[in-house]
Image (cartoon, rainbow, N blue to C red):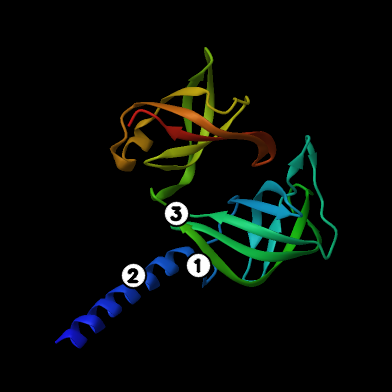
Amino acid sequence: MEIVIVCAVLALVGGMLVAWWGRRVCVPCVCPPLQVCQRLQIEVSGDVYSTLLYAANREHLELYPPLRRGLPVRFEAGTHATLSLATSGGLYTAKAVFTGYARDRTQGTVLLIAQVRGAWRMQQRRRHPRWYLPKEVAIEAQANSKTFVGWVQDISEGGMRLFAPIPLPEGMPVHLELPPSLRGYARFPSNRLAHVLACERALHHTEYQFTLRLAFTDG
Protein backbone atom coordinates (compact mmCIF):
# COMPACT_ATOMS: atom_id res chain seq x y z
CA MET A 1 0.00 0.00 0.00
CA GLU A 2 2.82 2.38 0.89
CA ILE A 3 4.54 1.65 -2.44
CA VAL A 4 1.33 2.56 -4.31
CA ILE A 5 1.06 5.86 -2.42
CA VAL A 6 4.70 6.71 -3.09
CA CYS A 7 4.29 5.98 -6.81
CA ALA A 8 1.17 8.11 -6.97
CA VAL A 9 2.94 11.03 -5.28
CA LEU A 10 5.92 10.73 -7.63
CA ALA A 11 3.62 10.63 -10.64
CA LEU A 12 1.79 13.76 -9.42
CA VAL A 13 5.04 15.64 -8.79
CA GLY A 14 6.38 14.54 -12.17
CA GLY A 15 3.27 15.79 -13.94
CA MET A 16 3.49 19.15 -12.17
CA LEU A 17 7.16 19.50 -13.17
CA VAL A 18 6.36 18.70 -16.79
CA ALA A 19 3.57 21.28 -16.84
CA TRP A 20 5.78 23.89 -15.13
CA TRP A 21 8.64 23.27 -17.58
CA GLY A 22 6.31 23.29 -20.56
CA ARG A 23 5.07 26.76 -19.71
CA ARG A 24 8.65 28.10 -19.71
CA VAL A 25 10.19 26.33 -22.66
CA CYS A 26 9.73 27.89 -26.09
CA VAL A 27 7.83 25.31 -28.11
CA PRO A 28 8.57 24.95 -31.85
CA CYS A 29 5.35 25.37 -33.85
CA VAL A 30 4.04 25.87 -37.33
CA CYS A 31 4.24 29.33 -38.85
CA PRO A 32 1.75 31.69 -37.16
CA PRO A 33 -0.81 33.46 -39.37
CA LEU A 34 0.87 36.25 -41.33
CA GLN A 35 -1.09 39.21 -42.66
CA VAL A 36 -0.27 42.19 -44.84
CA CYS A 37 0.64 45.26 -42.75
CA GLN A 38 1.04 43.07 -39.66
CA ARG A 39 3.48 44.55 -37.14
CA LEU A 40 6.76 42.81 -36.36
CA GLN A 41 9.78 43.60 -34.25
CA ILE A 42 13.32 43.07 -35.48
CA GLU A 43 16.21 42.60 -33.06
CA VAL A 44 19.71 43.00 -34.51
CA SER A 45 22.78 43.05 -32.25
CA GLY A 46 20.70 44.13 -29.26
CA ASP A 47 18.87 46.93 -31.11
CA VAL A 48 15.10 46.55 -31.53
CA TYR A 49 13.18 47.98 -34.49
CA SER A 50 9.47 47.97 -35.32
CA THR A 51 8.14 47.56 -38.85
CA LEU A 52 5.29 46.19 -40.99
CA LEU A 53 4.99 43.06 -43.10
CA TYR A 54 4.58 43.70 -46.82
CA ALA A 55 4.30 40.09 -48.07
CA ALA A 56 5.25 36.59 -46.94
CA ASN A 57 5.48 32.97 -47.91
CA ARG A 58 6.69 29.96 -45.91
CA GLU A 59 10.35 30.95 -45.82
CA HIS A 60 10.71 34.55 -46.98
CA LEU A 61 9.30 37.78 -45.60
CA GLU A 62 9.23 41.15 -47.33
CA LEU A 63 9.35 43.96 -44.77
CA TYR A 64 9.07 47.72 -44.88
CA PRO A 65 12.33 49.26 -43.60
CA PRO A 66 11.98 50.40 -39.95
CA LEU A 67 12.74 53.97 -38.96
CA ARG A 68 15.57 55.18 -36.77
CA ARG A 69 15.72 58.92 -36.08
CA GLY A 70 13.24 59.43 -38.89
CA LEU A 71 15.33 57.62 -41.52
CA PRO A 72 14.75 54.12 -42.96
CA VAL A 73 17.14 51.43 -41.70
CA ARG A 74 18.59 48.90 -44.13
CA PHE A 75 20.43 45.73 -43.20
CA GLU A 76 23.20 44.24 -45.30
CA ALA A 77 22.74 40.77 -46.79
CA GLY A 78 23.87 38.16 -44.29
CA THR A 79 22.76 40.14 -41.21
CA HIS A 80 21.17 37.84 -38.64
CA ALA A 81 18.09 38.94 -36.68
CA THR A 82 15.37 37.75 -34.32
CA LEU A 83 11.80 38.44 -35.43
CA SER A 84 8.94 38.86 -32.94
CA LEU A 85 5.31 38.65 -34.00
CA ALA A 86 2.24 39.29 -31.82
CA THR A 87 -0.93 37.42 -32.82
CA SER A 88 -4.29 36.78 -31.18
CA GLY A 89 -2.92 33.51 -29.79
CA GLY A 90 0.34 34.80 -28.35
CA LEU A 91 3.85 36.05 -29.01
CA TYR A 92 6.03 34.19 -31.53
CA THR A 93 9.71 34.54 -32.38
CA ALA A 94 11.94 33.19 -35.15
CA LYS A 95 15.55 33.46 -36.24
CA ALA A 96 16.08 35.06 -39.64
CA VAL A 97 18.78 36.39 -41.94
CA PHE A 98 18.44 39.29 -44.38
CA THR A 99 19.18 38.23 -47.93
CA GLY A 100 18.64 41.35 -50.04
CA TYR A 101 16.18 43.96 -51.20
CA ALA A 102 13.08 44.27 -53.38
CA ARG A 103 10.79 47.08 -54.50
CA ASP A 104 7.14 47.70 -53.78
CA ARG A 105 5.48 47.23 -57.16
CA THR A 106 3.01 50.08 -56.59
CA GLN A 107 4.88 52.71 -54.54
CA GLY A 108 8.46 51.88 -55.50
CA THR A 109 9.46 51.65 -51.83
CA VAL A 110 12.59 49.62 -51.07
CA LEU A 111 11.70 46.48 -49.08
CA LEU A 112 13.84 44.22 -46.89
CA ILE A 113 13.88 40.49 -47.65
CA ALA A 114 14.36 38.19 -44.65
CA GLN A 115 14.67 34.40 -44.75
CA VAL A 116 13.30 32.56 -41.71
CA ARG A 117 15.76 30.01 -40.30
CA GLY A 118 14.16 27.09 -38.50
CA ALA A 119 10.74 27.02 -36.84
CA TRP A 120 8.72 29.81 -35.24
CA ARG A 121 8.52 29.45 -31.46
CA MET A 122 5.74 30.49 -29.11
CA GLN A 123 7.16 32.61 -26.31
CA GLN A 124 4.01 33.30 -24.32
CA ARG A 125 0.24 33.13 -24.54
CA ARG A 126 -1.78 36.29 -24.23
CA ARG A 127 -3.71 36.98 -21.07
CA HIS A 128 -6.40 38.72 -23.12
CA PRO A 129 -7.27 37.49 -26.63
CA ARG A 130 -6.43 40.12 -29.24
CA TRP A 131 -8.81 40.80 -32.11
CA TYR A 132 -7.24 42.04 -35.34
CA LEU A 133 -9.83 44.16 -37.08
CA PRO A 134 -10.62 43.30 -40.72
CA LYS A 135 -10.62 47.04 -41.40
CA GLU A 136 -9.06 49.79 -39.29
CA VAL A 137 -11.56 51.83 -37.30
CA ALA A 138 -11.36 55.59 -36.76
CA ILE A 139 -11.64 56.65 -33.12
CA GLU A 140 -11.72 59.99 -31.32
CA ALA A 141 -9.24 60.40 -28.48
CA GLN A 142 -8.28 63.15 -26.07
CA ALA A 143 -4.97 63.57 -24.24
CA ASN A 144 -3.32 66.57 -22.61
CA SER A 145 -6.32 68.77 -23.58
CA LYS A 146 -5.85 67.87 -27.25
CA THR A 147 -8.43 65.99 -29.31
CA PHE A 148 -7.34 63.94 -32.30
CA VAL A 149 -8.54 61.11 -34.53
CA GLY A 150 -6.58 57.86 -34.51
CA TRP A 151 -6.92 54.47 -36.16
CA VAL A 152 -7.39 51.20 -34.26
CA GLN A 153 -5.75 48.12 -35.79
CA ASP A 154 -6.31 45.60 -32.98
CA ILE A 155 -8.05 45.55 -29.61
CA SER A 156 -8.35 43.31 -26.54
CA GLU A 157 -9.97 43.44 -23.14
CA GLY A 158 -6.74 44.90 -21.77
CA GLY A 159 -5.97 47.59 -24.35
CA MET A 160 -5.47 48.49 -27.98
CA ARG A 161 -2.96 49.61 -30.58
CA LEU A 162 -3.71 53.09 -31.90
CA PHE A 163 -2.11 54.93 -34.82
CA ALA A 164 -2.07 58.64 -33.95
CA PRO A 165 -0.90 61.83 -35.69
CA ILE A 166 0.85 63.07 -32.52
CA PRO A 167 3.30 61.46 -30.06
CA LEU A 168 2.35 60.94 -26.41
CA PRO A 169 4.70 60.18 -23.51
CA GLU A 170 4.53 56.93 -21.56
CA GLY A 171 1.99 57.05 -18.73
CA MET A 172 -0.10 59.80 -20.35
CA PRO A 173 -3.86 59.30 -19.69
CA VAL A 174 -5.97 59.04 -22.84
CA HIS A 175 -9.77 59.36 -23.01
CA LEU A 176 -11.28 57.27 -25.80
CA GLU A 177 -14.65 57.52 -27.51
CA LEU A 178 -15.39 54.07 -28.94
CA PRO A 179 -17.63 53.88 -32.01
CA PRO A 180 -20.41 51.23 -32.13
CA SER A 181 -18.25 48.97 -34.33
CA LEU A 182 -15.81 48.46 -31.41
CA ARG A 183 -18.26 48.16 -28.54
CA GLY A 184 -19.15 44.60 -29.43
CA TYR A 185 -15.66 43.39 -28.50
CA ALA A 186 -15.84 42.20 -24.88
CA ARG A 187 -18.90 44.47 -24.46
CA PHE A 188 -16.89 47.66 -24.26
CA PRO A 189 -18.67 50.85 -23.08
CA SER A 190 -18.62 53.91 -25.31
CA ASN A 191 -16.09 55.80 -23.16
CA ARG A 192 -12.83 54.26 -21.98
CA LEU A 193 -9.86 55.61 -20.05
CA ALA A 194 -6.40 54.29 -20.90
CA HIS A 195 -2.76 55.18 -20.43
CA VAL A 196 0.19 54.99 -22.84
CA LEU A 197 2.46 51.98 -22.44
CA ALA A 198 4.72 52.84 -25.38
CA CYS A 199 4.93 55.29 -28.27
CA GLU A 200 7.07 54.94 -31.37
CA ARG A 201 7.14 56.39 -34.84
CA ALA A 202 6.21 53.76 -37.40
CA LEU A 203 4.96 53.29 -40.92
CA HIS A 204 1.19 53.35 -41.31
CA HIS A 205 0.18 52.43 -44.86
CA THR A 206 2.12 54.93 -46.99
CA GLU A 207 3.01 57.51 -44.33
CA TYR A 208 4.70 57.59 -40.94
CA GLN A 209 2.66 58.24 -37.82
CA PHE A 210 2.94 57.30 -34.14
CA THR A 211 1.96 53.90 -32.78
CA LEU A 212 0.47 54.07 -29.27
CA ARG A 213 0.18 50.94 -27.17
CA LEU A 214 -2.64 51.69 -24.75
CA ALA A 215 -3.71 49.82 -21.62
CA PHE A 216 -7.23 50.34 -20.26
CA THR A 217 -7.21 51.71 -16.71
CA ASP A 218 -10.94 51.91 -16.00
CA GLY A 219 -11.50 48.23 -15.25
Q: Secondary structure at mark 1?
A: loop
Mark 2 or 1, closer to the camera: 2
**Distance of mark 2 from mark 1, alpha carbons?**
14 Å
**Residue most extreme to the left:** 1
Mark 1 or 3, closer to the camera: 1
- Packing grade of label 1 (10 A; few <14, some 14-19, many >=20) is few
Q: What amino acid does circle 2 point to? A: Met
Q: Is residue 166 above or below residue 15?
A: above
Q: Secondary structure at mark 3?
A: loop
Report the disc number at residue 16.
2
| Residue 72 coordinates in the image, percent (x, y) | 79, 43
Q: Quadrant of residue 15?
A: bottom left
Q: Earlier in the sequence, mark 2 or mark 1?
A: 2
Report the disc number at residue 25.
1
Q: Name which residue lies at 60% across and 25% down.
A: 169
The answer to whether marks 2 and 1 mark residues whose Cβ atoms lie closer than 8 Å is: no
Q: What amino acid does circle 1 point to? A: Val
| Residue 208 coordinates in the image, percent (x, y) | 69, 35
The answer to whether marks 1 and 3 mark residues whose Cβ atoms lie closer than 8 Å is: no
| Residue 125 coordinates in the image, percent (x, y) | 44, 57
Side of 44 where 84 appears, left or right:
left
Q: Is residue 188 above or below residue 123?
A: above
Image quadrant in which the N terminus is located? bottom left
Q: Earlier in the sequence, mark 1 or mark 3?
A: 1
Q: Which residue is mark 3?
A: 88
Mark 3 or 2, closer to the camera: 2
- Packing grade of label 3 (10 A; few <14, some 14-19, many >=20) is some
Question: Would residue 32 be seen by someone viewing this image from the given angle?
Answer: no
Q: Quadrant of residue 12?
A: bottom left
**Distance of mark 3 from mark 2, alpha carbons?**
27 Å
